[in-house]
Image (tube, rainbow, N blue to C red):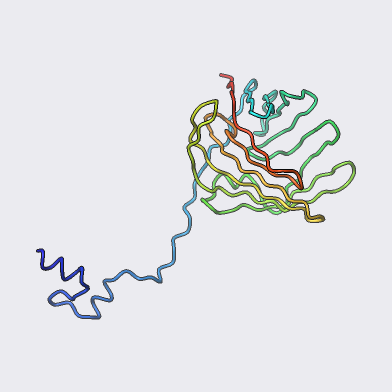
Amino acid sequence: MSAVCALIASGCLLPGQTTESAVMAAPSSDVSPKPAAAITIPAPQWKVGDSWTYSDGYGMKVTEVNADGTAEFTRLDDADQWFVRRGFFTEESKSRTIYRRVVFRTSDPMDLLTTGINQPVSFVREYMRNDELVRHRTSWVIEGREKITVPAGTFDCWVIVMRTQGLDSNWRGFERWYYNPDARNYIRLEYKYGESPNGSRVLMEYKLAG
């Protein structure tokens, strides 16, 4: 048996094996990689009263859950600001100075929840900002999974990245979410918007209704 193993290790032919059969038995280097298998990420199942507080003082609370799957959030650090979100995607928001209502073009961003690892979902989003039309080309991609520890605990997260660029300007934006379905939100967020410096926040505490 050891002699046979030595022959295999040295690349020699076994008895009865021709050069051609040895080549056919060898794995081919021309085999195309299999496409990424589709996955399903659970969408957040929000409930009125859910709340999250982060390291930079940012906080949010669910104030309404709608039949169409969207939820309305109020900022804990500024009650005059609110937004409406479907999954990871903000559809409507109001800051102290700007109201936005987003229209998604070319594809449904919710397709992200059933795509594969490193298979981006891209679309165009439009909104009015102070009577000016703003258009962005945006992509989201699931990069994989990672376990992270923050003051609120240790979480097994999906790593999801958003990149966006203005179609009528050079403005760019970036977000990396560490999303945990059980916590119904991101545990860590890394971001950069326009010329502002890089930023990040981690979850300090959270409360889930029910």
Residue 155 % position (x, y): 49, 32
Q: In which quarter of the image is residue 186?
A: top right
**Number of numbered labels in the structure image:** 0
Q: In this view, does 58 lie to the left or right of 113?
A: right
Q: Which residue lies furthest to the bottom in this view?
A: 19
Q: Quadrant of residue 14?
A: bottom left
For the point 23% across and 80% down, which residue is it?
A: 19
Q: Which residue lies furthest to the front in this view?
A: 197
Residue 71 % position (x, y): 68, 30
Which one is in front, 156 or 190?
190
Q: Which residue lies furthest to the right in this view?
A: 131
- Compared with 191, 27 (above or below) is below
Q: Is residue 12 left or right of residue 65?
A: left
Q: In which quarter of the image is residue 176?
A: top right
Q: Is residue 18 left or right of residue 133?
A: left
Indicate the quadrant containing the N terminus: top left, top right, bottom left or bottom right: bottom left
Indicate the quadrant containing the C terminus: top left, top right, bottom left or bottom right: top right
- Compared with 92, 55 (above or below) is above
Which one is in front, 75 or 46?
75
For the point 72% across and 43% down, which residue is it?
A: 197
Residue 157 % position (x, y): 51, 37
For the point 65% across and 53% down, which residue is it?
A: 122
Residue 139 % position (x, y): 65, 51
